[in-house]
Amino acid sequence: MRNSFQCLCWGFDVNEDIRLPDWGEKRDSVEGHSDRATRFEKAALALASCIIRNRNPSQGGAGIPVVVEGTRDEETLRALGFTGTIEKVNRGWDRSRLIAYLHSEYCFEPSIDGSPSVILLMDWDRTGGRIQTSIRDRLMAMDCPVDEDLRNTLLRAMKPEGRTVESLLAHVPSLHPLIKRIISETE
């Protein structure tokens, strides 16, 4: 007996050999690699690039500041190898004062390397996303370009390990050697 739904919609018998499409490759291209080593390599590459840009010009960098949410985020970035300026959102200032400060300190002159003047790195949770959007929109409205590539890369690569910048601290032993290797290859 044929199933009436199959007869109307598909026009074939249940016993026929049905070949379903293989969605495995498409799923991999949409979600990215689940291989931890590959994800950590991508994260280390993005971090190394920003570490170099964050360095003082006397050390071969561009002096681009990284803006994070708080003190623990700064400690994590220092443990990963950042040596330049790290600005914190949570310093007791309202958002307007913070934006005015960032604009006056970093946005009047173009950066040495021609890249955006500020690296925004908020957590990749809901609150971090709101802060990121707010700061980005306000700075860009004042013609101050911002770099969000590091956050976007970490959001994809490190999401299974955590949703905050400070959650990277537990992975410093794995990430730091990769970062050092990448930086030494570029110098």
Image: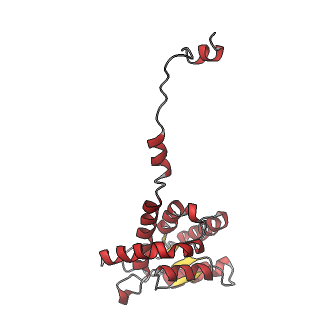
Q: Nearer the viewer, residue 134 or 76?
A: 76
Image colouring: secondary structure
Q: Is residue 127 left or right of residue 84?
A: right
Q: Can you give x and y, in whole percent of width and height, for residue 110 in the image?
A: 41, 78
Q: Can you give x and y, in whole percent of width and height, for residue 68 in the image?
A: 58, 77
Q: Is residue 134 visible?
A: yes
Kindly indicate the quadrant of the structure image that contains residue 112. bottom left
Q: Is residue 169 left or right of residue 108?
A: right
Q: Can you give x and y, in whole percent of width and height, for residue 31 in the image?
A: 50, 50
Residue extending farthest bottom: 58
Vertical placement of residue 38 versus 103, above or below = above
Vertical placement of residue 14 versus 90, above or below = above
Residue at left offset 64%, top offset 65%:
130
Q: Nearer the viewer, residue 119 or 173?
A: 173
- The image shows a total of numbered marks equal to 0
Q: Quadrant of the N terminus?
A: top right
Q: Quadrant of the C terminus?
A: bottom left
Residue at left offset 30%, top offset 74%:
185
Residue at left offset 63%, top offset 64%:
125
Q: Is residue 110 visible?
A: no
Q: Is residue 151 left or right of residue 110?
A: right
Q: Can you give x and y, in whole percent of width and height, for residue 37 in the image?
A: 44, 62
Kindly indicate the quadrant of the structure image that contains residue 10. top right
